[in-house]
Image (spheres, helix red, strand yellow):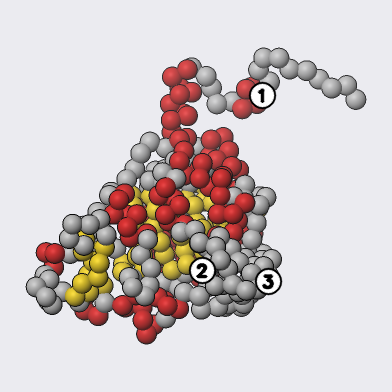
């Protein structure tokens, strides 16, 4: 008997037969293309890949990917995805959520999937607005955001998704931008290679209800000075020709922007990115334009045993099998007469 290798799949092979129904110009299209390319580059198999989502514009994702998928209920995608991974650890499980679905009604569930370190890729599309329900402000909306639910402007202190993930104990935290395709694909690949919960905040533009909200660091005229793309082991430099950099304020655990070559500042004075350093990741997650650049890339990566891996080890050690049907029928059972 000769084994036959399955042919490798192209990005188009991961496109479903469903009509993509996002608004023209929505950033979700770019993310969809990046994910399809990532799956093809990774040699993913459709029959072992699962996308789980909650509710919202982002959560239509499973319809548009030719893999297994679950469009679940509001905020509960982490719970469903955890069950899928525990039931069949061989599946490659991706969780897609938005700033509203994941950080409002789903905040509790997202917290626990991160602290447990379940082996999932978690993509949080952040457009700082509720798009599906017509533009109400969301947990990430900035103060002053005017919407149907905040006609006078939002007074809330917004949630930082990456700070939230770090605080919940996530072992992989990254940021990406919807339109920066090569960098987004590379970040998705890094997340996939990580064993445990991988969290990526993706800045995604909502052209209808919050168009241009990220222009203060994404617009081409300011991007060079307002974005810092962090790389492990490399100095934290940005700006034209890398003339700007980040260093610690002398005597304080705070970052400041300095100009290399001025006031005696050399490259040796700059911080070097260490993605295993959670304290540094927290400082980078807190940077905001215009005073600081927005940190893009892998902010934190420090692996630990995954929850599903520990569950598997516990089952093996106990001598119990993984037969869920047998488990459900074990012990005291009863039948209900018709």
Q: Which residue matches tag 3?
A: 148
Between the residue at mark 3 and the residue at mark 2, the CA separation in whole angstroms equals 15 Å
Between the residue at mark 2 and the residue at mark 1, the CA separation in whole angstroms equals 47 Å
Q: Which mark is residue 328?
A: 1
Residue at the image point whose x is 42% and y is 81% from the top: 219
Mark earlier in primary sequence (2, 1)? 2
Q: Tag 3's secondary structure?
A: loop
- Residue 154 appears in view: yes
Q: Tag 2's secondary structure?
A: loop
Of 83 and 109, which appears nearest the observer?
109
Q: Residue furthest top?
A: 331
Of 110 and 104, which appears nearest the observer?
104
The picture quadrant where one finds residue 334 is top right
The picture quadrant where one finds residue 41 is bottom left
Q: Are marks 3 and 1 in contact (CB under 8 Å)?
A: no
Which dot, 2 or 1, sits closer to the camera? 2
Between the residue at mark 3 and the residue at mark 1, the CA separation in whole angstroms equals 47 Å
Q: Residue furthest bottom?
A: 221
Q: Where does the image place residue 45, in percent across and percent down from the top left?
A: 50, 51
In the visual, does 125 lie left or right of 173?
right
In the visual, does 147 lie left or right of 36?
right
- Neighbour class for label 2 at 10 Å: few (<14), some, many (≥20)? some
Mark earlier in primary sequence (3, 2)? 2
Q: Which residue matches tag 2?
A: 142
Q: Is residue 178 above or below residue 24?
A: above
Q: Where does the image place residue 212, in percent across and percent down from the top left?
A: 51, 78
The picture quadrant where one finds residue 258 is bottom left
- Neighbour class for label 3 at 10 Å: few (<14), some, many (≥20)? few
Q: Residue furthest right?
A: 338
Mark earlier in primary sequence (3, 1)? 3
Residue at the image point whose x is 59% and y is 25% from the top: 323
In the visual, does 252 lie left or right of 43?
left
């Amino acid at each position: 008997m000769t084994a036959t290798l399955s042919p490798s799949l192209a990005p188009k092979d991961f496109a479903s037969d469903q009509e993509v129904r996002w608004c023209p110009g929505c950033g979700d299209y770019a993310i969809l293309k990046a994910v399809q390319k990532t799956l093809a580059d990774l040699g993913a198999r459709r029959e072992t890949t699962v996308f789980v989502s909650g509710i919202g514009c982002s959560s239509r994702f499973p319809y548009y990917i030719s893999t297994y998928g679950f469009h679940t209920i509001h905020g509960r995608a982490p719970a469903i995805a955890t069950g899928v991974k525990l039931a069949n650890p061989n599946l490659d499980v991706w969780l897609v959520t938005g700033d509203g679905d994941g950080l409002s009604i789903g905040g509790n569930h997202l917290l626990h999937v991160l602290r447990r370190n379940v082996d999932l890729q978690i993509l949080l599309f952040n457009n700082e607005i509720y798009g599906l329900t017509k533009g109400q402000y969301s947990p990430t909306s900035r103060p002053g955001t005017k919407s149907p639910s905040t006609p006078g402007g939002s007074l809330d202190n917004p949630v930082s998704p990456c700070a939230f993930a770090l605080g919940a104990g996530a072992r992989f935290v990254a940021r990406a931008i919807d339109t920066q395709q090569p960098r987004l694909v590379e970040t998705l690949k890094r997340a996939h290679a990580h064993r445990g919960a991988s969290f990526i905040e993706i800045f995604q533009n909502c052209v209808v209800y919050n168009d241009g909200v990220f222009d203060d660091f994404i617009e081409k005229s300011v991007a060079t000075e307002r974005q810092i793309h962090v790389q492990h082991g490399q100095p934290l430099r940005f700006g034209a020709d890398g003339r700007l950099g980040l260093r610690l304020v002398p005597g304080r655990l705070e970052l400041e922007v300095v100009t290399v070559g001025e006031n005696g500042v050399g490259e040796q004075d700059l911080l070097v990115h260490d993605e295993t350093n959670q304290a540094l990741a927290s400082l980078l997650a807190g940077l905001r334009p215009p005073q600081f650049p927005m940190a893009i890339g892998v902010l934190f990566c420090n692996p630990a045993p995954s929850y599903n891996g520990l569950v598997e080890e516990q089952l093996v050690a106990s001598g119990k099998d993984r037969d869920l049907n047998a488990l459900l029928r074990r012990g005291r059972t009863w039948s209900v007469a018709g």
